[in-house]
Image: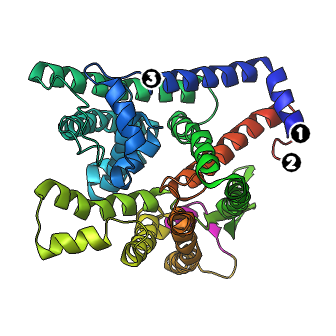
C-alpha cells in the first residue's frame, strides 16, 4: 500500500490533485478555528472546558470538526448542505417535477444541485440565527457555564454574525466543489472526513490523561477491531447475476454478456444514524425551549436525555433500524431496476423478466437490509457502551457516526485513486 502511495505521488497530475486536496483541507481547518466577529474567544474556551455537550449540538459539532461550539466562521460546517441534499433526495420521490429532472440526466442533475445550493443558504440562515439566539443567553449553549459568549448582543452585531456564518457555509460548498473538480474524491465527503478526523487525536489523548495507559491501549485495540469490522461490512454485497440476451441489429450484435447487480449489506450508509440522532433529540429540545415542569417533560429529561439510559438506547436502536428500511425503500426502486433490465434485454437466471424480477429484488433487498440495520444500530451504540463501561465522553472516537463516515470516505477515496492508477498501468492500490 505504501508503494502504491509512492507511485501515486510519482504521477505528476495525480500528485498535483492530492496536494490540491490537502491544501483545501488545510484551508477548511483554518476557517474552523477563526472565531466569528462578536464572539468572546476566551469565554468560549472557558465554557468548552467546563461543559460537555451531546445531543444534536454534539452531532453538528462532530460534522463541523468542533467549529460549531467554537462559533467560528465555519461554525455550521457541512451540515446545512447534508440536510439540503437529504431533503431534495426525499422530495424527488414525492414531487413529480423533481423526479423528471432526476431522469433527464446531467442537465436535470445540475438543476437539482442548484436547488440544493439555494436550500443550503436558506437553512444556513435559519441555523445560524438559531445558534446565535441560543448562544447569546449564558448557560444555554454550554450547560453549566454562565460566561457570556456574545458580550455585544445588539441587532447590528447579530446580523453581522448571521451573515458571516452563512457566507462561511457558502465558502464550504465552493471548497467541496473545487475538490470534486480538481482534486481527489468527493469534495463534500472529504470535508466531512477532515472535520471528524481532526477530533480523533484530542479525544484519544483525553482518554489517556483521564483513564490511564491501560484504558488508552484498550480503546486503541477496540478501535482497530471496529474499523476492521466496518471495512468488512461496508464492502460486503450480494451480487445478483444478470444475463443480457444477444441481439442482432444489421451486421452488429449486441448483448450476450453477463454482469451483476451489487446490493450492499449497508445500502443506506450513515443516513439512518443521522436521522435517528436528530429525531431523538427533538423531545429534549422542546423541553429546553419550553421550560416546562410537567410530568411529560420530567419523563423526557429522565429517559430521553441521558445516552446511557435503557429507554434511550432501545429507542435509538429502533429508530436506526426503522430509518434503514425507510431510506433503502426510497433509494432503491426494484420496479425501476426490473423495467430497465427488461428494456435492454436483461434477465436474472431462473427469474422471469418484469414483475417476478421486481418481486425477487424486493425479497433479496428486504432480507439483506435486516443484518445491515442491526449492524448500523450496533455501531451507533458503541459510544454509549463506552460511556457506561468507562464513563467516557459521548464523542467516543471509535464508534457511531464518526467511524462510519471516516471508513466510508476513506474507502471511496482509495478506490478513486486506485482507478486512476490502473489507467496508468499501475498495480492495484488496495492489494
What residue sits right under mark 1 in the picture?
A: 427
Residue at 37%, 77% (x, y): give it. 311
Q: Is residue 101 visible?
A: no
Pair 3/2: label in front? 3
Label 1 – label 2 distance at C-alpha: 8 Å
Q: Are marks 1 and 2 in contact (CB under 8 Å)?
A: yes
Give the total number of marks visible in the rendering.
3
- Asked where in the image residue 299 lies, by quadrant, the reply is bottom left
Which residue is tagged 3? 31
What whole-number distance in Å separates the C-alpha atoms at marks 1 and 3? 38 Å
Q: Position of residue 328 (x, y in %)?
A: 47, 66
Mark 1 vs mark 3: give the one in front: 3
Residue located 49% across and 69% down the image: 334
Tell me, yes or no, whether the two marked residues, 1 and 3, touch with CB atoms within 8 Å. Answer: no
At x 45% / y 25%, what residue is drawn? 33
Of the image marks 3 and 2, the number of the one nearer the N terminus: 3
Residue 347, above or below 183:
below
Amino acid at each position: 500500500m505504501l508503494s502504491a502511495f509512492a507511485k501515486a505521488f510519482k504521477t505528476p497530475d495525480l500528485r498535483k490533485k492530492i496536494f490540491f486536496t490537502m491544501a483545501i483541507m488545510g484551508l477548511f481547518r483554518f476557517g474552523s478555528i477563526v472565531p466569528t466577529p462578536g464572539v468572546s474567544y476566551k469565554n468560549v474556551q472557558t465554557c468548552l472546558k467546563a461543559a460537555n455537550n451531546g445531543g444534536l449540538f454534539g452531532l453538528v459539532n462532530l460534522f463541523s470538526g468542533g467549529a460549531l461550539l467554537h462559533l467560528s466562521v465555519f461554525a455550521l460546517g457541512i451540515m446545512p448542505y447534508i440536510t439540503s441534499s437529504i431533503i431534495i433526495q426525499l422530495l424527488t420521490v414525492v414531487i413529480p417535477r423533481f423526479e423528471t429532472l432526476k431522469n433527464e440526466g446531467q442537465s436535470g442533475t445540475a438543476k437539482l444541485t442548484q436547488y440544493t445550493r439555494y436550500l443550503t443558504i436558506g437553512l444556513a440562515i435559519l441555523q445560524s440565527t438559531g445558534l446565535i439566539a441560543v448562544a447569546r443567553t449564558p448557560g444555554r449553549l454550554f450547560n453549566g457555564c454562565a460566561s457570556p459568549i456574545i458580550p455585544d448582543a445588539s441587532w447590528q452585531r447579530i446580523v453581522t454574525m448571521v451573515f458571516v456564518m452563512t457566507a462561511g457555509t457558502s465558502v464550504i460548498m465552493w471548497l467541496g466543489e473545487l475538490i470534486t473538480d480538481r482534486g481527489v474524491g468527493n469534495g463534500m465527503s472529504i470535508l466531512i472526513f477532515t472535520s471528524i478526523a481532526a477530533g480523533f487525536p484530542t479525544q484519544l489523548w483525553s482518554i489517556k490523561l483521564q483513564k490511564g495507559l491501560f484504558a488508552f491501549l484498550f480503546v486503541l485495540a477496540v478501535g482497530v477491531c471496529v474499523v476492521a469490522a466496518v471495512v468488512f461490512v461496508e464492502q460486503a454485497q450480494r451480487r445478483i447475476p444478470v444475463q443480457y440476451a444477444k441481439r442482432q441489429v444489421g451486421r452488429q450484435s449486441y448483448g450476450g454478456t453477463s454482469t451483476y447487480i451489487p446490493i450492499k449489506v449497508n445500502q443506506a450508509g450513515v443516513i439512518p444514524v443521522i436521522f435517528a440522532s436528530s429525531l431523538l433529540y427533538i423531545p429534549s429540545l422542546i423541553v429546553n425551549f419550553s421550560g416546562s415542569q410537567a410530568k411529560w417533560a420530567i419523563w423526557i429529561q429522565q429517559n430521553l436525555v441521558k445516552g446511557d439510559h435503557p429507554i434511550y438506547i432501545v429507542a435509538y436502536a429502533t429508530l436506526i433500524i426503522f430509518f434503514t428500511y425507510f431510506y433503502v425503500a426510497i433509494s432503491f426502486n426494484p420496479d425501476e431496476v426490473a423495467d430497465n433490465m427488461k428494456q435492454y434485454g436483461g434477465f436474472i437466471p431462473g427469474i422471469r423478466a418484469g414483475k417476478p424480477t421486481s418481486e425477487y429484488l424486493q425479497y433479496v433487498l428486504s432480507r439483506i437490509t435486516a443484518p445491515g440495520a442491526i449492524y448500523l444500530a450496533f455501531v451507533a451504540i458503541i459510544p454509549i457502551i463506552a460511556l457506561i463501561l468507562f464513563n467516557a465522553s459521548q464523542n467516543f472516537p471509535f464508534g457511531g457516526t464518526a467511524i462510519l463516515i471516516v471508513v466510508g470516505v476513506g474507502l471511496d477515496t482509495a478506490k478513486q485513486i486506485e482507478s486512476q492508477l490502473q489507467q496508468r498501468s499501475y498495480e492495484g492500490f488496495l492489494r
